[in-house]
Amino acid sequence: MILGYLAAFSAQAFDWAPDLKWGLNGRTYPVGLQAFGAAGIGLPLWGSTDQWKYGYLRLGANLASSAVVNRAGYELQLFPISILGLSYGWDTGTRNYTPKFINCSIYECNGRVDRSFWKGHFIAAYQGVIFSMTGRYEKLESFRSSKPFFDELTLLSGQSAGEHLLTLNPLLLYKWDETWKFGWLSIYAHALDSGGHSHLYGPIVAWSNPDRVNVAGGIGINESSLIHTAISAFFTIQFTLEPSLAVADMIQREKIYSSLF
């Protein structure tokens, strides 16, 4: 009876907000294509989502698959204020693919890799200019590997006993009109234990249909301490079935863009 009362009270006292997205992303070098999905539930903590002055808590699940590489995990996000937040997450992935661009006799390219991570988020906008920064610190563990393992996400290698990685992802965009944005993307990753690094950077163009579709793509330089540096095109297509409490989703819906800074 008490539990039933508490459940009813929670449903009335808190405005839980479910979210659901799916999409595709890929690159041309090294060639890769994957489908992804994300579902979660958010809880507003204070303020109103009609402007950027609010905070929230979100628990989400993430899936990604390219048929031969599959990952699943969860993420807990705390945003004391909508433009600044911290996440903790974990995922596990299985690989059944031997890439041609890496020597898999030296590096373990298949099997299972687990990732646990902390991630910081920041976003700001002013007069049509949008800046976001994501920083991620994670530990990778390869199961039953007696040799260094290859990580297909960062194009880096990790020690068989485990590897710590730091990834920085700044993004700068200018809003041209209601649907088009232009800017610059950088994704830099550094293996803290083995010392390798990778960097994908270049111009990016984004198109959005309010409430539903985001498309972004660009052509840049993809470099890594393990593979040859080359030009790579990259893209992502995201379909929002139900937007989350993230301020980026609110910006897409044009609810608080004008109130950000």
Image (cartoon, rainbow, N blue to C red):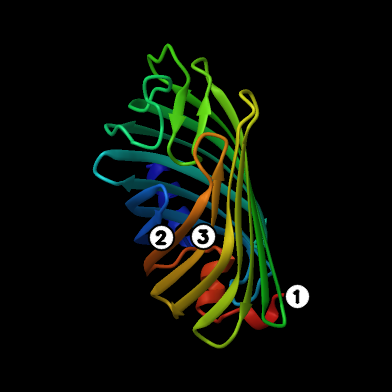
Sequence-first disc among 2 and 1? 2
Q: Residues within 10 Å of mark 1 (few under 14, many from 20)?
A: few
Q: Is residue 242 visible?
A: yes
Q: Secondary structure at mark 3?
A: helix
User: Left or right of 124: which side holds 75?
Assistant: left
Q: Is residue 250 above or below residue 32?
A: below
Percent from the top left, x then y, of residue 200? 56, 52
Q: Residues within 10 Å of mark 2 (few under 14, many from 20)?
A: some
User: Left or right of 242: which side holds 220?
Assistant: right
Q: Which residue occupies the foreground of this view, 214 or 60? A: 214
Residue visible at 42% across and 51% down in the picture: 29
Distance in Å between CA atoms under marks 1 and 3: 30 Å
Q: Secondary structure at mark 1?
A: loop
Percent from the top left, x then y, of residue 148? 48, 19
Q: Which mark is residue 6?
A: none
Percent from the top left, x then y, of residue 151? 45, 33
The residue that label 1 is drawn on is 261
The residue that label 3 is drawn on is 13
Q: Which is in the foreground here, disc 1 or disc 3?
A: 1
Question: In which quadrant is the N terminus drawn?
Answer: top left
Sequence-first disc among 1 and 3? 3
Q: Is residue 241 above or below residue 109?
A: below
The residue that label 2 is drawn on is 18
Q: Is residue 81 visible?
A: no
Distance in Å between CA atoms under marks 2 and 1: 27 Å
Percent from the top left, x then y, of residue 110? 33, 27
User: Left or right of 58: which side holds 25?
Assistant: left
